[in-house]
Image: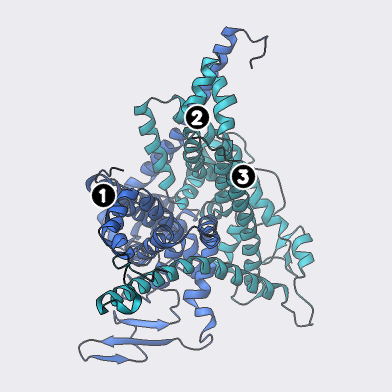
Amino acid sequence: MTRPEASPTARTRSSHLVLVACALAAFIAVAALASLLLTIAVEGTGSLSWKFLTSFASRKAANAGILAPLAGSVWVCVICALVAIPMGIGTALYLEEYAKKSRLQGIIQLNISNLAGVPSIVYGLLALAAFVRFFGFRSGEKPLSFSIEWSELRVLAPGNPDSFWFVQAPFGSGVLAGGLTLALVVLPIMITASQEALRAVPKSLRQAAEALGSTHWQVAWRVTLPAALPTMMTGAILSISRALGEAAPLLVIGGFLMVLQTPTNLMSDFTVLPLQIYNWSGRPQEEFHRIAAAAIIVQLAVLLAFNALAIFVRQAFQKPLQS
Amino acid sequence: MTSLPASTPFLSPRARPARVRLRAAVEWIIESILFLLTVLSVATTVAIFLILVRETWGFFTMRGADGQVLVPIADFLGDSIWSPLLSNPPRFGVASLVSGTLLVTAIAAAFALPLGLLTAVYLSEYAPQRVRSVLKSLLEILAGIPTVVYGFFALTFITPNLLQPLSSSFGTHSAMSAGIAVGIMILPIVSSLAEDALRAVPQSLRDGSLALGSTKAETILRVVIPAALSGIVASFLLAITRAIGETMIVALAAGGGVAQLTANPAAQVQTMTAYMVQVFLGDAPAGGVEYQSSYAVAFTLFAFTFVMTWIGALILRRYREVYE
């Protein structure tokens, strides 16, 4: 295989060279991460304060805070989790536990991996048409709206926009539309993670349950799902942290860059942390870069907490499964 | 469809007690619900496609006051100038936006593909266990950072500290700055997927090569990497797809609102995604031709990423080397 002119020492030397190149590449990756974190820490720590966390955005950087985007991120991510996690697990259950190996199943599988490659901004266009506008339902008119008065046990129509129980159709660009948008974006990730978790459950567990007379769903619900749940939850947390960092699709559906209130119901206007960071980073003034960096620190802290939670779940609840 | 529960295989349907029939009905309902959920994911793709087709069709059939088609497809594909907001009449040559996207993607790929592959080789073939696990979790952190943060990094670190000392031709925004930031973003995708592919190569192949007298590097370059090639190429394609669709980094760092057909890395460029951001942030009135053009741009973007994903899936399926 080796060319005759290459002497043993030369070959050893070039072998070392490859090692050096590889280690250097790994070092550059780490250096990039280090300089990223360092830049943010240096720019941002000075602006971080309790006041920064509890005030609204402002024209003056010194008075600006991230209360609105923080609250918006929480609302949107909770909605996203409530939609995407059950749907992802349900789809994975069907594909792994029910679907026969068929052409149709192959197409669905390919479709899901294709969906994961669709740019998130394109999901924004779908969400804009589907959730914000209901495909043109009542376009040009006031949306249908109602709210529930629990104290009097009656439904108001048109609803009272200040009530927590206020809903309108089409949704418009409120937190519900935002949460559903993010659910679309992370659903393929959630499905794939849940499928992998289900695949890791040994066949013998299912066979034992079937041998005891369980029906298909009883096996899935009482045996397979509990065994796969810790891994699934890890996948779920990672999906939600992906949703937490998304800005582009929310920008398309009309997430606002400047919001001066926290959401009160599912139809409220909102902004999220990444959108606020985008807004501040894009301005030419240095002081806005500093508060952008401070907002990034908050964002990364939340993400880090999520990841720690994922690791904790993985280690605390994962029982070793023997096959 | 499960018509018979496993518990009563010997009873004919009529002889089954009510409780068992109920059980079978519940089973059927649950399976149907799960099936509908699965269909929903296919419906998402179909809906995206239909919306893009409908709105793009609307864009190409918009007529001005004189009854003329405003933007013929030939202009969209053939014109070299994209200037929907500033020039009169507006020009819609998508080539400028595509070239912006390709320039940023090319810079990102030139940075991330070799670096990611070398990192993967280090992780899989050289790194001691301790170093490997630390390095992997660092790369995981890098993969979890929101893309808007990379945009911030491009503006506040890459441009002033790396590019501007190098050459005075770099302004605040440039294709180079955005490209490097996108490259850092896709680096962990390449390194982690390529590492998976490398580790899937059986040890016996390495042992065989070493036993024949090859050095470690020769083994890696001539045995391990060729054996893992389909996985490595698939990781490259996935990373490039992500780079093409990346939005927030390029919206922040690649340029203002000016699209131009150029290969100069120091120039400001506008990508397909950045144009969409500009439109949806409200620079164009809804319903107008500028607003509608964003759907034609989105369709072009979708076509690019769809083709890339398909090629990736094909390569993985056709050229995968399967070992026992």
Disc number for residue B318: 3
Q: Colour of chain A?
A: blue
Mark 2 = which residue? B121
Report the front residue among A313 and B68: A313
Provide residue A243's location: percent of width, then percent of height: 41, 58
Q: What's the residue type where badge 1 is placed?
A: Val
Distance from the alpha carbon under mark 3 to that under mark 2: 24 Å
Indicate which disc, 3 or 2, sits on the residue closer to the N terminus: 2
Q: Indicate the position of residue A224 as horizontal and vertical percent values.
A: 31, 56
Chain B: what color?
cyan
From this viewpoint, is residue A60 visible?
no
- Report the disc number at residue B115: none
Give yes or no for contact between labels 1 and 2 (Cβ–Cβ under 8 Å). Answer: no
Question: Which residue is tagged 1?
Answer: A313
The picture quadrant where one finds residue A176 is: bottom left
Q: Are marks 3 and 1 in contact (CB under 8 Å)?
A: no
